Amino acid sequence: MNVSVSVMPSTSLSAPSAPLFLENLPDPDLSAGVCPRRARLEIDLMLLAIEALDLGGSEAILSVAKELELQGIIKNRVALWRIRSTNPLRRYSQRQPLTLVEAKALVAIACHLARRLTVVIRQLLLAYQQLTEKQLSVEHHFRLYDYLERFRAHFRARMNPRRAGVLAYSSDEKLNELALSLLGKLLFCTGTFGMQRFWISLFDGEVE
């Protein structure tokens, strides 16, 4: 992975509202100082997968924001909706950019929740592997099927069906593949330095 990051103190963290632990996520060398399209999309999809895993996912995101003292960045539900809507595939996509500090806050929340859901994530990935080996459909595992069904419903309700990036997931099969790939990425976030590794992966190929 060829990613250049700054090791200097982050200028985007100069505001007192940003917790010091976010400094563990180095600033990528981006001229605009804001998150590129792929990073905005990936972060939102990871949170969408968490919401499909956890019935209280939306509330959990706000609860963890408070727990991690990120209220200065994510003040309330409206603020959360606004920064997640920087995902260009959203039905009501926001034109304003996603700042690096906002992105770091979302990544911290996603990784924190992923760690809480580690057992569930592992169980679902193992179930999928076993079903594949036995050549059985996902309908044979209730919890996996429920996750996939909820993810498809969330995706279709929140994404703009006219966008080319959404049209690519027009079938249940394609959305299931996306949902399963996100499970693997969430598991990646639960490991040692998972938050840092996920953060850096968002900018792979985006910077020199």
Image (cartoon, rainbow, N blue to C red):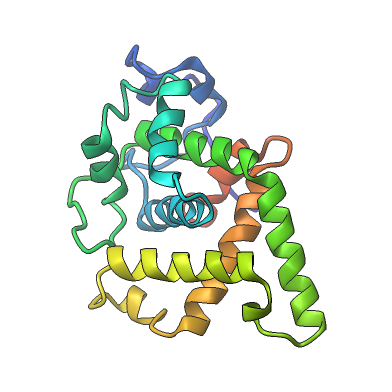
Q: Is residue 103 above or below residue 161?
A: above
Which residue is at the front of the view, 175 or 17? 175
Q: In this view, does 162 lie to the left or right of 73?
A: left
Which residue is at the front of the view, 150 or 114? 150
Which residue is at the front of the view, 85 or 172? 172
Q: Is residue 208 left or right of residue 87?
A: right
User: x, y percentage for residue 31?
Assistant: 35, 42
Q: Which residue is drawn at 29% across and 63% down?
A: 158
Q: Residue at x 31, y 78 (%)?
A: 164
User: x, y percentage for residue 205?
Assistant: 52, 57
Q: Is residue 110 left or right of residue 11?
A: right
Residue 208 visible within the image: no
Q: Is residue 172 above or below residue 58?
A: below
Which residue is at the front of the view, 39 or 31? 39
Q: Residue at x 53, y 75 (%)?
A: 176
Indicate the quadrant where residue 29 lies: top left
Q: Is residue 51 above or below residue 165?
A: above
User: x, y percentage for residue 165?
Assistant: 35, 74
User: x, y percentage for residue 64?
Assistant: 46, 30
Q: Is residue 34 left or right of residue 206?
A: left
Q: In this view, does 65 lie above or below 44?
A: above
Q: Which residue is drawn at 51% across and 34% down?
A: 108
Indicate the quadrant where residue 83 lies: top left
Q: Residue furthest top?
A: 16
